[in-house]
Image: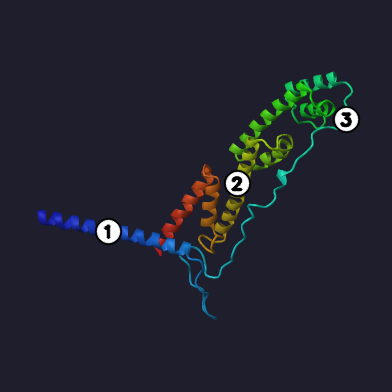
Amino acid sequence: MKAEGRDLSIQKLRLAVGLAGLVLFALGYLAVAHFRSEPPPGPGVGVDEPADPLGTVAGSDPGEEDPDPDRERSWRGKVSMGTGAAVTDVAAVLAAADEALEQGRLIQPEGDNALSRYLDILEAEPDNEAATEGVHAIVVTLMKRLRGHLDRREIDAAAQLFPLLNSLIPEDPDLIAAGHRLERLEHAGELYALALKDLEHGRLIRPKNRNALSRLKRAAGLDPDNAVFANQLLELERRLVDDALAA
C-alpha cells in the first residue's frame, strides 16, 4: 500500500511539473513574440501564409499610427466672456450679476449670465471688489465642475470648459495640473479606440507598438484607474495565454 501511495504521489508530482512547464513555455512564447522587433519574413511566391496561433499573420496590415501626444490641442485656447458693453450704472449691473449668480446662471445664457456682467464691470472698474469676488466664486465652482468631468472621464465636457478657465486663471497650478490630466485622458482614449480596431483586425501583439496589447498597456498606464482599460487588457492577456497553450 505504501509503495502504491508513493507511486501515486510521484505521478501527481510529474503531472504538476509538466503543467508548470507548459505554462512557462506559453509565457515565454508570448514574451518572445511580443518583444520581437520584426515579424518573420513573408512566405515565398505561391506559398500560403502560415497560420499564426496568436491571431496575426506575417506581413499583415500594419495598422494606424498613434496620435501625437504632444500635438497642439484646440481646447488649450482662450475665450472671452465679457459682452463688451459699456457699463454706465455699475450698481445696476452688479445687482443683475449677483442675481444671476444666485440663480445658477454662471456662464449661460450668452450675454445674460453672472460672469459676463462681472467682467463688464471689471472692464470699467478693474478694482471693483464685489465683481472680483463674484468672478472668484464662479471660478471655484467651474474648477469643481472641471475636476468632476475629469473624474468621470467626460473628455468632451472638460475640453469645452477648459478654455474659459484658461482665459480667467491661466497660471493657476490646479488648472495647469487639470490640463495635463485632460491631455493624458484624451490620449488614453485615443489609444483605446485604436486598440479596439487592432482587436477587430487581429493585430494582437504585432506589428511592434501598433497592436492591441501595446496600446492597451499604454492606455492603462495613462489612466490606471480606468476599469474598462484594465478589464480589456486582462481579457486580452488571458486570450494570448490560451492561444499560446493551444499552439
What's the residue at 55%, 60% (across, down)? 209
Name the side, left or right, on which 61 lies relative to 108.
left
Q: Whole-percent x and y of residue 113?
A: 79, 28
Label number found at residue 85: 3
What's the residue at 75%, 31% (across, down)? 107
Tell me the amino acid under the disc marked 3.
Ala
For the N terminus, the image quarter is bottom left
Residue marked by disc 2: 184
Label number found at residue 17: 1
Q: Whole-percent x and y of residue 91?
A: 84, 18
For the C terminus, the image quarter is bottom left
Q: Whole-percent x and y of residue 63?
A: 60, 62
Q: Earlier in the sequence, mark 2 or mark 3?
A: 3
Name the side, left or right, on which 181 lies relative to 164.
left
Q: Residue extending furthest front?
A: 127
Q: Is residue 193 above or below residue 100?
A: below
Q: Earlier in the sequence, mark 1 or mark 3?
A: 1
Image quarter of residue 93? top right
